[in-house]
Amino acid sequence: DAKTTQPPSMDCAEGRAANLPCNHSTISGNEYVYWYRQIHSQGPQYIIHGLKNNETNEMASLIITEDRKSSTLILPHATLRDTAVYYCIVRAGSARQLTFGSGTQLTVLP
Amino acid sequence: DAEITQSPRHKITETGRQVTLACHQTWNHNNMFWYRQDLGHGLRLIHYSYGVHDTNKGEVSDGYSVSRSNTEDLPLTLESAASSQTSVYFCASSDRQNYGYTFGSGTRLTVV
């Protein structure tokens, strides 16, 4: 699986959009981009995933660049409950394991 | 509603004891996984299973074992607990399509 690079920490004001970047310059054509988050002491939570096209669900939007070497997770209106560690993971569609990196600690400030 | 549950939530045991952590899911998922999480190491895969009677080693499998006798359960056994196995343990499951993992709430294990 391709490696990912994320900033170790970010702050965001409550009510504003949180934009979390992820670099995956060695991504292969069959690898998906997944995002998970982990709120303190809880199990990780699946957020969204995509291959080429931008994706949106009730939690977030995923923007993948045309060359697929980077992506951005967007939380449109961050709340205090969105404070968590966010993990960007790249994984082949045929693989069934997830490998977690160190993620980005997002702190939403009141 | 379908769920994945881990038990116990907290466990204190002595060095050398055998310990079993339970994981039970009602999603009817084929794939199940055990991770441990330590400060400074993030989540690391211990063992995983793709179906009944299937088990595989992850990156930190030494000292741990699993067995899969049915779809719902993947118990994790520490054969002889060591202080280095003090950690938070998370169980997860995913369906055949494997798009999103569902994680349990974790078991905090302390080996004294």
Image (spheres, coloured by chain):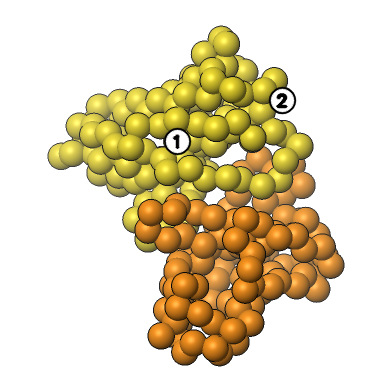
> Could you tell me the amino acid type at mark 2?
Asn
Q: Quadrant of residue A29?
A: top right
**Residue at 64% of width from left, 35% of height from top?**
A1
Name the residue tied to disc 2.
Answer: A30
Neighbour class for label 1 at 10 Å: few (<14), some, many (≥20)?
few
Q: How far across and how far down the image is residue B51, in percent?
A: 80, 60
Neighbour class for label 2 at 10 Å: few (<14), some, many (≥20)?
few
**Residue at 64% of width from left, 72% of height from top?**
B64
Is A20 situated above or below B35? above
**Residue at 56% of width from left, 60% of height from top?**
B35
Per the rendering, the mark at residue B66 is: none
Is B67 situated above or below A97? below
> Could you tell me the amino acid type at mark 1?
Met
Q: Which chain is yellow?
A: A
Q: Which quarter of the rendering shows the C terminus of chain A?
A: top left
Name the residue tied to disc 1.
Answer: A59
Q: Nearer the viewer, residue B101 or B84?
A: B84
Q: Which chain is orange?
A: B
Q: Quadrant of residue A94?
A: top right
